[in-house]
Image: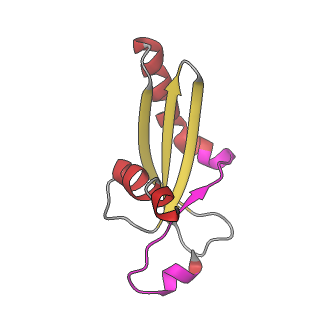
Amino acid sequence: MDWAETKHKIGFITGLTGNELLGKLSRTTIESAKREFKACQKPVKRYHSFSYKAASWQHYQRVVVKVEVSDKGSNVRYIVSNIRCIRTKALYENAYCARAGAEL
């Protein structure tokens, strides 16, 4: 992450392990998705982004949370990126998830 920040026009996206603070920053999105699922009984998927800085990071970064709620329970995932020009859902689904195809 720090290396990419020193290079011009190099973006990064990587998974991020959840923690207590990320959970707090995501609470509204998580609770909203759970309420919607409870009301509609249909799977719900929500995305939200916010700035976050871990103790080991030099700068604040963009964090995206993806929340899925269904009859199987809740699934909360995080990614971190320095790419700000792509909408939250597109960054997660089209850029981050697409990396799996590039790795094959």
Horizontal and vertical percent position of residue 52: 54, 59
Regarding residue 51, the answer to whether it shows in the image is no
Residue lying at 40% horizontally and 49% vertically, measured from the top left: 93
Asked if the stretch drawn in magenta spans residue 74, the answer is: no
Question: Residue at 60% of width from left, 48% of height from top?
Answer: 22
Please name whichever residue, 9 or 52, is drawn nearer the observer in this view of the structure: 9
Magenta stretch: includes residue 4: yes
Residue 82 falls in image quadrant: bottom left
At 60% across and 42% down in the image, what residue appears? 24
Q: Is residue 43 above or below residue 57?
A: above
Q: Which quarter of the figure has residue 27?
A: top right
Q: Please state if 78 lies on the left or on the right of 102 as rendered.
A: right
Residue 29, position in %: x, y?
A: 47, 36
> Which colour style is shown?
secondary structure
- Let me know if residue 19 appears in the view: yes
* Part of the protein shown in magenta: 3-22
Q: In the displayed image of the protein, which residue is found farthest to the bottom?
A: 7
Identity of the residue drawn at 52% across and 67% down = 60
- The spot of residue 81 in percent (x, y) is 48, 64
**Residue 76 in the image: above or below residue 84:** above
- Indicate the position of residue 71 as horizontal and vertical percent values: 54, 18
How many marks are shown on the rendered structure? 0
